Image (spheres, grey):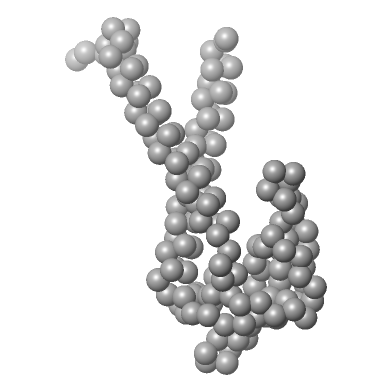
Amino acid sequence: MSKIEKILLLVVAIFFSFKIIGTTLYDAKLLFILSRYSEETFATVIDSKESIFSSRKTGEVYILTVIYTDKYNKTYITNIRSDYHLSPGNTIKIIYSKFFPKVADIKGYHRRKFEFYCYLFLSFMIIITAIYYYRKSKSTPDYWKSKKRY
Protein backbone atom coordinates (compact mmCIF):
# COMPACT_ATOMS: atom_id res chain seq x y z
CA MET A 1 0.00 0.00 0.00
CA SER A 2 1.50 3.31 -1.02
CA LYS A 3 1.86 6.28 1.28
CA ILE A 4 -0.89 8.24 -0.51
CA GLU A 5 -3.35 5.37 -0.10
CA LYS A 6 -2.55 5.16 3.62
CA ILE A 7 -3.09 8.90 4.05
CA LEU A 8 -6.35 8.76 2.10
CA LEU A 9 -7.55 5.82 4.20
CA LEU A 10 -6.63 7.70 7.38
CA VAL A 11 -8.52 10.83 6.25
CA VAL A 12 -11.63 8.78 5.44
CA ALA A 13 -11.43 7.01 8.81
CA ILE A 14 -11.08 10.32 10.66
CA PHE A 15 -14.02 11.79 8.72
CA PHE A 16 -16.33 8.89 9.59
CA SER A 17 -15.14 8.93 13.19
CA PHE A 18 -16.04 12.62 13.56
CA LYS A 19 -19.36 12.02 11.81
CA ILE A 20 -20.31 9.19 14.20
CA ILE A 21 -19.19 11.11 17.29
CA GLY A 22 -21.02 14.25 16.09
CA THR A 23 -24.21 12.28 15.48
CA THR A 24 -23.91 10.76 18.94
CA LEU A 25 -23.58 14.17 20.58
CA TYR A 26 -26.50 15.57 18.57
CA ASP A 27 -28.77 12.65 19.51
CA ALA A 28 -27.68 12.94 23.15
CA LYS A 29 -28.65 16.62 23.14
CA LEU A 30 -32.06 15.89 21.62
CA LEU A 31 -32.78 13.02 24.01
CA PHE A 32 -31.73 15.12 26.99
CA ILE A 33 -33.93 18.04 25.92
CA LEU A 34 -36.93 15.78 25.31
CA SER A 35 -36.49 13.84 28.55
CA ARG A 36 -35.89 16.85 30.77
CA TYR A 37 -38.05 19.63 29.34
CA SER A 38 -40.82 17.82 27.48
CA GLU A 39 -44.56 18.32 27.39
CA GLU A 40 -47.22 16.19 25.73
CA THR A 41 -49.79 17.34 23.23
CA PHE A 42 -51.75 16.09 20.26
CA ALA A 43 -50.61 16.89 16.73
CA THR A 44 -52.35 16.68 13.38
CA VAL A 45 -50.50 15.17 10.43
CA ILE A 46 -50.33 17.51 7.44
CA ASP A 47 -48.16 15.45 5.10
CA SER A 48 -46.40 12.08 5.06
CA LYS A 49 -43.42 11.37 2.77
CA GLU A 50 -41.26 8.29 2.45
CA SER A 51 -37.69 8.98 3.53
CA ILE A 52 -34.71 8.29 1.32
CA PHE A 53 -33.17 6.39 4.25
CA SER A 54 -35.65 3.52 4.02
CA SER A 55 -34.01 0.14 3.90
CA ARG A 56 -34.88 -3.52 3.90
CA LYS A 57 -33.35 -4.01 7.34
CA THR A 58 -35.06 -1.18 9.23
CA GLY A 59 -38.23 -1.03 7.16
CA GLU A 60 -39.96 2.00 5.76
CA VAL A 61 -39.21 5.32 7.40
CA TYR A 62 -41.62 8.19 6.90
CA ILE A 63 -41.19 11.90 7.47
CA LEU A 64 -44.38 13.29 8.97
CA THR A 65 -45.08 17.00 8.78
CA VAL A 66 -47.23 17.79 11.81
CA ILE A 67 -48.90 20.88 13.22
CA TYR A 68 -49.47 21.36 16.93
CA THR A 69 -50.08 24.07 19.50
CA ASP A 70 -48.25 24.51 22.78
CA LYS A 71 -49.77 25.54 26.09
CA TYR A 72 -49.47 29.23 25.12
CA ASN A 73 -51.57 28.61 21.96
CA LYS A 74 -48.66 29.14 19.57
CA THR A 75 -48.83 26.94 16.50
CA TYR A 76 -45.75 25.06 15.26
CA ILE A 77 -45.07 22.97 12.18
CA THR A 78 -42.25 20.43 12.35
CA ASN A 79 -41.02 17.19 10.76
CA ILE A 80 -40.98 13.94 12.73
CA ARG A 81 -39.59 10.53 11.73
CA SER A 82 -41.92 7.56 12.06
CA ASP A 83 -42.21 3.90 11.08
CA TYR A 84 -45.90 4.30 10.32
CA HIS A 85 -47.50 5.82 7.26
CA LEU A 86 -50.20 8.16 8.49
CA SER A 87 -52.56 9.93 6.17
CA PRO A 88 -53.13 13.69 6.42
CA GLY A 89 -55.66 14.54 9.11
CA ASN A 90 -54.66 11.77 11.54
CA THR A 91 -54.00 12.78 15.14
CA ILE A 92 -50.96 11.51 17.07
CA LYS A 93 -49.63 12.11 20.57
CA ILE A 94 -46.22 13.82 20.59
CA ILE A 95 -43.78 15.19 23.11
CA TYR A 96 -42.04 18.50 22.49
CA SER A 97 -39.54 20.63 24.33
CA LYS A 98 -41.03 23.63 26.09
CA PHE A 99 -37.84 25.66 25.49
CA PHE A 100 -37.25 24.50 21.89
CA PRO A 101 -40.75 23.80 20.51
CA LYS A 102 -39.43 22.71 17.11
CA VAL A 103 -37.79 19.68 18.79
CA ALA A 104 -40.54 17.05 18.87
CA ASP A 105 -40.93 13.29 18.69
CA ILE A 106 -43.77 10.77 18.76
CA LYS A 107 -44.57 9.57 22.27
CA GLY A 108 -43.34 6.00 22.71
CA TYR A 109 -41.08 6.06 19.63
CA HIS A 110 -37.91 4.29 20.79
CA ARG A 111 -35.93 4.06 17.55
CA ARG A 112 -34.07 7.30 18.31
CA LYS A 113 -32.89 5.87 21.66
CA PHE A 114 -31.79 2.62 20.02
CA GLU A 115 -29.83 4.51 17.34
CA PHE A 116 -28.27 6.68 20.05
CA TYR A 117 -27.09 3.59 21.98
CA CYS A 118 -25.61 2.09 18.79
CA TYR A 119 -23.78 5.33 17.95
CA LEU A 120 -22.59 5.64 21.55
CA PHE A 121 -21.13 2.12 21.39
CA LEU A 122 -19.42 2.92 18.07
CA SER A 123 -18.03 6.16 19.51
CA PHE A 124 -16.50 4.34 22.47
CA MET A 125 -15.01 1.72 20.15
CA ILE A 126 -13.50 4.44 17.94
CA ILE A 127 -11.97 6.22 20.93
CA ILE A 128 -10.57 2.99 22.40
CA THR A 129 -9.12 1.99 19.01
CA ALA A 130 -7.53 5.42 18.54
CA ILE A 131 -5.94 5.25 22.00
CA TYR A 132 -4.67 1.72 21.30
CA TYR A 133 -3.03 2.65 17.99
CA TYR A 134 -1.58 5.85 19.44
CA ARG A 135 0.05 3.96 22.30
CA LYS A 136 1.22 1.25 19.91
CA SER A 137 2.86 3.77 17.58
CA LYS A 138 4.39 5.65 20.51
CA SER A 139 6.00 2.50 21.91
CA THR A 140 7.78 1.55 18.67
CA PRO A 141 11.51 2.38 18.52
CA ASP A 142 11.13 4.06 15.11
CA TYR A 143 8.90 6.70 16.63
CA TRP A 144 11.67 8.00 18.88
CA LYS A 145 14.30 7.92 16.10
CA SER A 146 12.22 10.25 13.95
CA LYS A 147 11.95 12.87 16.71
CA LYS A 148 14.44 15.71 16.58
CA ARG A 149 16.35 16.33 19.75
CA TYR A 150 17.46 19.83 20.53
* Residue beneath the point at 72% across and 63% down: 84
* Residue beneath the point at 74% across and 44% down: 56
* Residue beneath the point at 64% across and 73% down: 78
Q: Nearer the viewer, residue 26 or 114?
A: 114
Image spot of residue 30 (x, y percent): 48, 63
Image spot of residue 22 (x, y percent): 49, 48
Q: In the figure, residue 133 lies in which quadrant?
A: top left
Q: Is residue 36 above or below residue 9?
A: below
* Residue beneath the point at 54% across and 13% down: 3
> From where the camera sits, is residue 77 visible?
no
In the orientation shown, which residue stands out farthest toward the bottom? Answer: 73
Q: Is residue 125 above or below residue 95?
A: above
Is residue 87 shown left or right of residue 27?
right
Q: Is residue 10 above or below residue 37?
A: above
Is residue 16 shown left or right of residue 83?
left
Q: Quadrant of the C terminus?
A: top left
Q: Quadrant of the N terminus?
A: top right
Image spot of residue 2 (x, y percent): 57, 10
Numbered disc total: 0
Q: Is residue 30 above or below residue 8?
A: below
Q: Nearer the viewer, residue 145 or 26?
A: 26
In the orientation shown, which residue stands out farthest toward the front? Answer: 108
Image spot of residue 66 (x, y percent): 69, 75
Q: Nearer the viewer, residue 18 or 40?
A: 40
